[in-house]
Image (cartoon, rainbow, N blue to C red):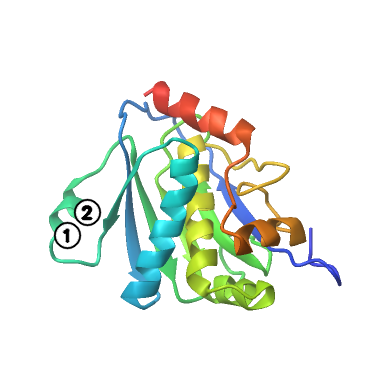
């Protein structure tokens, strides 16, 4: 899908990587996040608060660990395994030489079906472009972009929903939800997310 004239849209992509399954056995969701784009600490904090809001609305607890602080460094380097995910906010968008992503994709999750996927990237320039289109702070869009990609990692699938936070292309209706701070996981995604957590 691509943006059309009176449709504000963006797309997230999840790479489907076929590897051996890894057992998921943890009941705590931990997200290590890395600021590789140099975004201000206040804006990054606001983004994490926004991302967390989406999970709270789904009755899911996430422990967010900022891996660019001295206090968290030991945890980030030593904490691995099921239930631990990594998200990096980077300052450049893909140049097309790696994974084949649409030119307007804001994020990318490396998803291993039916296993413990661990890594996602958020492209700050694309986030900023979308934020400008819909007229909201970059931190708000960044937060929902992070929640979207973490959603893929927990779900263990690159599949998208028909509406809401996990929709592949955010149209004007999702933009309105974003502006109002009510961009949530759709009920079906919530059910799968919670089932995944219960099964650990």
Assign a secondary structure to mark 2: helix
Residue 193 on image: x %, y %: 50, 32
Left or right, 129 with reference to 88: right
Location of residue 172 by image quarter: bottom right
Assign a secondary structure to mark 1: helix
Rounded to the nearest angstrom, the CA distance separating label 1 from label 2 is 5 Å
Task: Spot the residue most to the right.
Answer: 5
Up-down relation of residue 10 to residue 78 (above or below): below
How many labels sit on residues?
2
Q: Residue at x 59, y 52 (%)?
A: 183
Is residue 95 visible in the rendered structure shown here? no
Image quarter of the C terminus? top left
* In the foreground, 64 or 1: 64
Residue for badge 2? 76
Location of residue 158 by image quarter: top right
Residue 150 on image: x %, y %: 46, 48
Task: Spot the residue most to the top.
Answer: 199
Residue 59 on image: x %, y %: 44, 35
Location of residue 9 by image quarter: bottom right
Left or right, 19 with reference to 9: left
* In the foreground, 164 or 65: 164
Q: Residue at x 52, y 73 (%)?
A: 138
Is residue 65 visible in the rendered structure shown here? yes
Q: Residue at x 71, y 45 (%)?
A: 163
Residue for badge 1? 73
Circles 1 and 2 in contact, beta carbons < 8 Å: yes
* In the foreground, 194 or 124: 194
Residue 178 on image: x %, y %: 61, 60
Q: Residues within 10 Å of mark 2 (few under 14, many from 20)?
A: many
Left or right, 156 with reference to 126: left
């Amino acid at each position: 899908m691509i943006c059309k004239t009176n449709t504000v849209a963006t797309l997230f992509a999840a790479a489907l990587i076929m590897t051996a399954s890894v057992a998921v056995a943890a009941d705590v969701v931990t997200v290590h996040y890395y600021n590789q784009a140099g975004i201000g600490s206040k804006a990054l904090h606001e983004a994490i608060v926004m991302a967390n809001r989406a999970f709270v609305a789904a009755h899911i607890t996430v422990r967010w660990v900022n891996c660019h602080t001295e206090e968290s460094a030991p945890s980030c380097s030593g904490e691995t395994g099921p239930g631990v995910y990594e998200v990096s906010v980077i300052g450049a968008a893909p140049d097309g030489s790696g994974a084949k992503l649409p030119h307007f994709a804001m994020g990318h999750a490396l998803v291993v079906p039916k296993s413990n996927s661990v890594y996602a990237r958020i492209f700050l320039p694309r986030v900023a472009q979308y934020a400008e289109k819909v007229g909201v702070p970059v931190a708000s869009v960044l937060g929902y972009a992070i929640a979207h990609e973490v959603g893929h990692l927990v779900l263990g699938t690159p599949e998208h929903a028909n509406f809401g936070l996990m929709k592949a292309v955010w149209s004007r209706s999702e933009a309105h939800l974003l502006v109002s701070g009510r961009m949530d996981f759709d009920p079906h995604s919530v059910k799968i997310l919670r089932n995944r957590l219960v099964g650990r």
